[in-house]
Image (tube, rainbow, N blue to C red):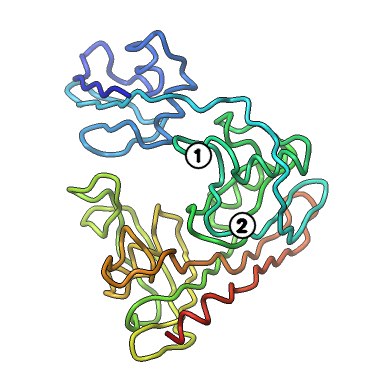
Amino acid sequence: MTTNSFVIEPHESDLRLDKLLTARFPNHSRSYFQFLIDQEAVFINGKIPKKKDKIRPGDVVKVTLQSLPDPSVLPENIPLDILFEDDHLIAINKPRGMCVHPGAGNPSHTLVNALLHHTKSLPKSSSPVRPGIVHRLDKETSGVMIAAKTTEAHSLLVDLFKFRKIEKQYIAICENTPREGIVSLPIGRHPVNRKEMAVVEGGKEAITEISVLDKTWKYSLVLLKPKTGRTHQLRVHLKALKSPIVGDKVYGNATKNRPFMLLHAYKLNFIHPILGTPIELTAEIPKEFLFSLEK
């Protein structure tokens, strides 16, 4: 793994970022740099860019070249808790501790490996290690996840998420009692800890609706409805409200944390992208959530 920094020359202006990187590092393909951008291994002027971003003379580009996961993701016979399945899509209750797709440090035993065994094939996406995947959950987050079984379903599901046509509900246990209602706090890259997100001035719009379902003197069971889809949005918003999610090793209180994070993707509501029928998917709240609230 090596890190390179360089300044954009005038003749390189207006190039797409992935094309520029391919020209600068001809031993690597454009898809490789698209993968690095997805992995947040590329920065422009200290900020995470998009693949289609155009660059300007004087921009400072920093790229960390890393190993590409084996594109031949193998099927693995891993049991799945299937919530819904038809010819177009599949929804499962992802267990806590399972990565969605192979990556650095997690080359196998992921949801993609399990789905490939169950479905026999999945449509290719922009990355060879994420066939069928249209959204993601953090490794320590359990709950409802959808995957596409056809190329058409993949494209349409991506659009549903992109244009906020899927209603998402999460359950979490957090410290203290956060204020209820609509929380609108912009989120961007942490100015110091670049692997973290934070509420920052000039960040991207991030909106979460919060309801308190139950509480004790030190913990609350909350229902979270994200209206936008920023990275780590729920975790960052609750931290900003001084009610971090219990067990969150990044944004929580390390001295009080449990062995795992108490965040669960509880429900998804949407219109089936092919059939046009309403779909409601619910993943039962893990028992450890209710037990933890009593502690």
Identify the residue shown where x is 49% and y is 36%: 103
**What is the quadrant of residue 278 in the picture?**
bottom right
Which residue type does callout 2 highlight? Lys
The residue that label 2 is drawn on is 94
Question: Is 63 placed above or below 262 here?
Answer: above
Q: Earlier in the sequence, mark 2 or mark 1?
A: 2
Q: Residues within 10 Å of mark 2 (few under 14, many from 20)?
A: many
Whole-Å distance between the Cαs marked 2 and 1?
16 Å
State which mark lies toward you, 2 or 1. Answer: 1
Question: Is 52 placed above or below 198 here?
Answer: above
Element on which disc 1 rests:
loop
Image coords of residue 170 (percent x, y): 52, 69
Image coords of residue 289 (percent x, y): 51, 76
The residue that label 1 is drawn on is 106
Which residue type does callout 1 highlight? Asn
Element on which disc 2 rests:
strand
